[in-house]
Each structure stands twice: as C-alpha cells, then as structure tokens.
Amino acid sequence: MMMRCRVVQEVWELSDDATENAILDSYALALFVGTDPWQPRPPSASALRAFRTSLDAAGVLGRFGVIVERSFLLQGLAFRPGYIREPIFRRQPLA
C-alpha cells in the first residue's frame, strides 16, 4: 500500500498531506492504493513521510520517478506529471 501511495505522490506531485487527502477524496485512488473506497483509511501523512524518508535513506527515492516512468513506457504509456484534476496518460507506440 505504501508503494502505491508513493506512486500517487510521484504521478500527481503531491505532498504527504495532499496524498492522504487525495485518497480520502477519490474513489479511484482509494481503490488503487488498496483501501476500502467507501471508508478509506489511507496511511497518515506522517507514515507516508516516514516511508519516503526510508526510501531516501536506502538511496531509492531519487530514482523512483525514473522507475515509475519506465514502467509506464514499457506498457506503452507516456508519463507526464499533471495536476490531480487532469493526469495525462497517453498510449505511445512501443519502440
């Protein structure tokens, strides 16, 4: 669940607090991270912060965006961070 929350943060460039709120407000995000969309209980902002800090300490955080982007490209999707109101995912031909 924490890794999916980190993907949400990366895709929509959200802070820890904004990620928690976005999951509470969005049925789709609640489903994506694996919490009950009718009564979402996402990780708290402090838990997200602690997870992000542990990724940074392990040296993974700096590469996380590249890993997410590459995963999208392997599926034929272009990844461009956007706003929570308008994320942009477009099919791209595989090269």
Image (cartoon, rainbow, N blue to C red):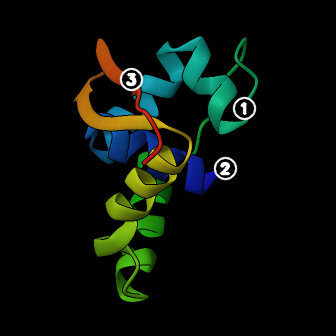
- Residue at the spot x=69%, y=24% of the render? 31
Q: Picture coordinates of residue 73 (x, y %)?
A: 44, 47
Question: Where, by quadrant of the figure, is residue 65 drawn?
Answer: bottom left
Q: In the shown orientation, is residue 17 left or right of residue 31?
A: left
What SS does tag 1 mark? loop
Res. 3 visible in picture: yes
Q: Which mark is residue 35?
A: 1
Q: Amino acid at mark 2?
A: Met
Q: Are marks 3 and 2 in contact (CB under 8 Å)?
A: no
Q: Is residue 93 above or below residue 10?
A: above
Please tell me whether mark 3 or mark 1 is closer to you in this view.
3
Q: Is residue 3 above or below residue 82?
A: below
Question: Where, by quadrant of the figure, is residue 2 drawn?
Answer: bottom right
- Residue at the spot x=59%, y=17% of the render? 28
- Residue at the spot x=51%, y=14% of the render? 26
Q: Is residue 95 above or below residue 56?
A: above
Q: Picture coordinates of residue 87 (x, y %)?
A: 33, 21
Res. 44 visible in picture: no
Q: Considering depth in this image, is 61 or 57 the residue closer to the camera?
A: 61
Which numbered disc flags the more N-terminal residue, 3 or 2? 2
Residue furthest to the front: 95
Q: Amino acid at mark 3?
A: Arg
In three-dimensional space, the C-alpha distance between marks 3 and 2, rounded to whole angstroms, equals: 25 Å
**Residue at mark 3:** 90
Q: Are marks 1 and 2 in contact (CB under 8 Å)?
A: yes
**Residue at mark 2:** 1
